[in-house]
Amino acid sequence: MELIPTPLNAESEMRAKLQDTDIIGIILWIFRAVILVLVVWGTIAALLDNPYSTRQWLDFIVFGIAQGSMYALIAIGYTLVYGVLFMINFAHGEFFMSGVMTATVFLAGPMAASGFLNRNPILSLLIITLVSMAVSVLVAVVTERIAYKPLRKAPRLVPLITAIGASFFWQYFFRGLFGSEVKPFPQLEILTGTIPFLGTDILKTHVVVIIVTIIMLVGLNFFIMRTKIGKAIRAVAEDKDVAALMGIDVDRTVTITFATGAAMAGVAGVLFALVFRQVHFFMGFIPGIKAFTAAVLGGIGSVPGAAIGGFFLGMFESVGPALFLEGLGIPAPHQLKDVIAFTMLVFVLIFRPQGILGERLSEEKA
Amino acid sequence: MKRTFIVLSALILAALVLSACGGGAAEFVCEDEIGCVDYAPGDPVRIASALVISGPNTDLGTDSQYGVEIAMEFREEILGHPIELQAEDDGCSAEGGQTAGQKIVSDPSIVAVVGTSCSGAGVPMSQVISDAGYVMVSPSNTAPSLTDPDQAFNPGYLRTAHNDKVQGRAMATFALEELGVTTAAAIHDGDPYTEGLARVFADSFEEMGGTIVDFTAVNKGDTDMRPVLTSVAAAGPPEFIYYPVFTAEGGFLTKQAKEVAGLEDATLAAADGMISDAALDAVGEAGEGMYFSGPDLSFSGAIYESFIAAYNDKYGTDPISVFHAHAFDAANMIFDCVEEVALQDEDGTLHVGRQAMRDCLYATSGFQGITGTLTCDEFGDCADPKISVSQIQGGEYVRIWP
Amino acid sequence: MAKTSMNDLRIPLRLGLIAGGISLGLSAIGMVALFGQRELVTNVLTLGEVILLAAPLLLAYMSARQAPEAKAISAILYGLITGIVAALPLVALIVAASTLDLRQFLPNVSPALIELLTFNQGVIAGSLILTGVFAATGVLAAIAYNLPDQIRSPLSSGLLWTLTIGLFSEILSNRLRAFFGSGINQILFDGKALNPFAALALFIVITVIAAFWGRRKETVQEQISSLPPARQRNLRLASIAAGVVLLLILPLILGTYLSEVINNVGIFALMGLGLNIVVGFAGLLDLGYVAFFAIGAYSMAVFTSNGSLGISDLTFWSALPFCVAISAFFGLMLGLPVLRMRGDYLAIVTLGFGEIIRILALSDMLKPVIGGAQGILQIPKPPFFGTSLVQPEQLYYVILAGCLLAAFVSWRLSESRLGRQWMAMREDEDVAEAMGITLVSTKLLAFSIGAAFSGLSGAIFASKLTSIFPHSFNLLISINVLSLIIVGGMGSLPGVVVGALILVGLPELLREFAEYRLLMYGALLIVMMLMKPEGFWPSAVRRRELRSDEDDFTEAGALANEAGD
């Protein structure tokens, strides 16, 4: 069999695959079974000895959706860039950070001090969001121009390394610029308090986050599917050479893709600041990694996938520790929420290697 | 080519001979068990500092270093020798502490070390310092293990900072006796400092008759604390929540605790990791009425006033962190001991025995420092531990207990 | 004519603005002011001035290169314009800082910075001086461009070496004092920097040597290559022997502190050798490599610790094989679920695995076993015939032995059947499979051998540090190891060492700039990938790949595109 030189021999491939499946398949099944048993056992134990009221369960879900919304908005940047360039833009978390940091230091802080913010909350928020988006887009375009564009044809590891480099660079650049302290983001009076909903009270900021995210997602979908630029992005994602033949400016389209992702990250930054009310130079790194996880979970390259991945991840993190771990008698379960998130990622990828909504990519030459 | 070689060799030889002659013939015989540090007439007495002067905890270390520098300025000279500081960085990590330690012990002219800032760096560094026969006094290590002979204690290690055991117990006492609460929860962020402190608090609180409803943790870098707070609420809800974490996570916990059902009326408390202007900004209005435990910084006395004046004069600001006075005291303990144990030749040459230095420091008793009256025990705990609790009132820290 | 020259002036204007932007950025984030405290040549030059002037110098040189005619005067004009334009953003900063309270937004625009930028001469005079200095820098760069190569390159090496010696004055003077007493020291150094006269002398000496070597280099090389083969082989053997002797006596030359630095480099080089097998040979992108380092370290700690968490009385040497075996086993366990994943899916899953291990080490759940946040203390140092290896100079030999062993194994593997299977798999998994390579065992072997090296490194690390904390095992380590093999040159064994020296050794020596360490690190990674993507010491195969014609890349791109369908 190994003497057959042609790689196109389907039968030999099939047979090799089948042989593999025998050994690994069993191990993978054991792995799945162990996780499933743990999850089910933990869940049953948690529900039998339920310390939480229905309202608290609802709260967990709302927290998860709100956190997931932000992951979703950031994940879109990863997924768009991946779809077009097949590269992990490790620096995307910094695009998220840079916009809202700048807007907080130059706008939100002084606005709150002068009282302008609470007198004209909508106008202020609009200005802050626009500036945040603009700075994020600027940082993204500069990064793309310097660190990615010249490497379009290099092997895949090379742009990954520059992306890691860019991530560190921007983090510490902004740290040097604005200082290493935590910067408070002012509280808006109109967004203080809660709204009653389905027997629980939802924070107004959470409502804003969820609504804005949905609007942004729908808008983005329209942009990608209906507009001319969106079509160009999709064409470049399908095949750069053919797209270029059809008269599409590939470089410009790639830049626009980066800018679109960064704009979403800029909005996510402001939502983050509204909910958590403090910003910091390191705030982009961990959400960036989480959003990347979300993008892979949902199926990297797919925009709805990124959104669903984000919501799922937020939910695992919020509900998971209480639902799966507490029942097993594990101390400090919330410390382990990232363990749950990553285990779920592996779990999902074993069942569906292409992610929840992804195309069959991971086993191909991605 | 050959000629150059000869000339070079001749030069090197000459240099060697010169340096050998320059050393002079010392008749002094060192009788110290470990060895002696010698200072020729006019040479400075050299001490080192190993404090965190880079990275996110820079303020902590820089502040302590200023304390050492002011102590040097006040002392001017020791037995006719000027004092020189070799400032190193402990990096606030185990690796950083070890490397800084190796750098210090590679310099035989250093007589003692003020450091480290972080306990994690102190553990490996105290081993390096101990093995090399040096001695160190830390102004801000608080981990109980460092002075526990069953854990990380090494001969040659001392500290002027309080042991966490004291602070955790003080907070428990305050909560039970002053506030009259009976149920509490403790949250840490996985940092050795916060975990240790939270644990001592929880143990003491239960020992004194209170109930710990939940002992849990978040991760550094977490932002959404509501799920963990909801769990805390479901476990109790407690009347009192103690989270001795740092500014970023502490800010999130403070703001979000008020928004979680069941915790609206809980009393919040943190520790000295959150006593700073940045933390005050971070907690904002949500922090009003919150309590903080920390070393009692209400120092008084003429020395402290002149210290603060010198600090302002030299660095243009009020002290930027907590442990400057502890560092000042640590440096002075060292200077006193050098003066006490140094043997002086007629020409002014100093000989300081390393074991004698250690013995002298461990024997410190009734030392009048800014931070109180210091007396060292055999495992190097020298602090006169005074823990106070302050509260944010009207956007400022106000000391309320004891 | 006038029109075209006006048009052409856009080049120096643009380059000048870029240079000014870079200098402005470096000033605004505080680098110039902080580095200004580090003197290179006493009372003459600080590192802050060097980095302030570096951008105008380089960009003026580039703009002189693009000057239209071959005439020297137009190049100088271009350099001058670039220099002057580069000063404008800084002048704007000076003016803005003197009229507004910029510090409330940008804490690093401090009075010290403005003093440095204006040479302490007030706003107007200072701005003029600054512009003058920048203009002079631009002109100098243009003049340098016009010099013949035989003069320019010795001059620039003279300058670079003198600055480098100035930068490392403190360490050099320590070592010189240890060997030659304080005599030479006082001639060369003044405090922590070079003495001005010594700097000048050094500059001249190095320039002359460089000029001499530049002329003789080729003849020497020719002489060597014209030697008979037997003599050539002897020469090679002699240089290898010299290298071995140097490696053996290195700690004696370096002293305690530098040995400690070299040990840290060695720990990372050892990890790099392991990751090199996974990424460099087999092409499996692993972002969670720190996991195995942690597993090795924790195994060593649990086996040998004298504290309450120690479970056995094993010594360092008897525990070592277990630590390596446990790490290799975990490598296998990680390998299994990710066998079917490729590329970026693999990257994120391994990253997750690294984080899982770190969080578990930190967690309250495993605190009774591995100490949680308080780590494991009281790990003994390696014993050695009755004594224990306490000093860095002694530990050096343990680490050296580990590195040599790993390098030897890697080298033999790369030439073996398995090594060729890895490389085939790296190039194309499907083709490799069709050629009869069993992907499962090949991949699992790569994961577990790589993990074993990392575990070895971790075990030595734990014993060296004598106490371990979960914070030592963060994502940054994985990224650092990946970066060092790429900076050194993927798949290349000497490259790993070079990469470790640059990314681990250098930052250690420049510790006082730790605040900007990661910023420079990031910039270095980007510049490196743009200028020398094959690394400083590339392997022969890789060099061929990256330097071959562009068609290969397009092919790879097209393949990637197809996969997206």
Image (tube, coloured by chain):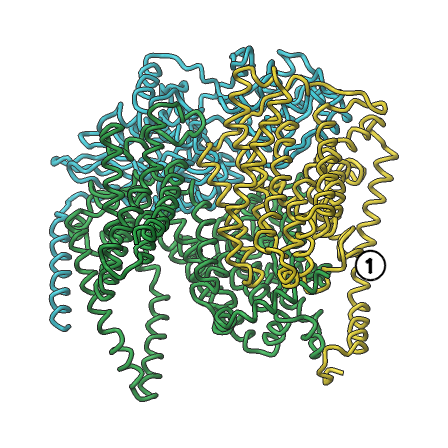
A44 left or right of A134? right
Work out whether residue B365 or residue A51 is closer to the camera in this orientation and state it: A51
Res A352 visible: yes
Return the x and y of residue C144 as percentages of the image width and height: 24, 57
Please give the name of the residue rendered at 19% of the width and 56% of the height, measured from the top-left corner. C202
Please give the name of the residue rendered at 36% of the width and 32% of the height, measured from the top-left corner. C93
C520 left or right of A238? left
Compared with A233, C414 (above or below) is below
Instruction: Chain C: give its colour.
Output: green
Return the x and y of residue A199 as percentages of the image width and height: 85, 23
Which quadrant: the N terminus of chain C? bottom left
Work out whether residue A297 or residue C564 is closer to the camera in this orientation and state it: C564
Chain identifier for the cyan-coloured part of the image: B
Amino acid carrying label 1: it is Trp
Q: How many labels does the image show?
A: 1
Chain identifier for the yellow-coloured part of the image: A
Please give the name of the residue rendered at 33% of the width and 38% of the height, measured from the top-left corner. C88
Please give the name of the residue rendered at 30% of the width and 23% of the height, measured from the top-left corner. B314
Return the x and y of residue C32 as percentages of the image width and height: 34, 39
Compared with A22, A51 (above or below) is above
Q: Name the residue under label 1.
A: A29
Res B101 visible: no
| Corner quadrant of residue C451 | bottom right
| Corner quadrant of residue C44 | top left
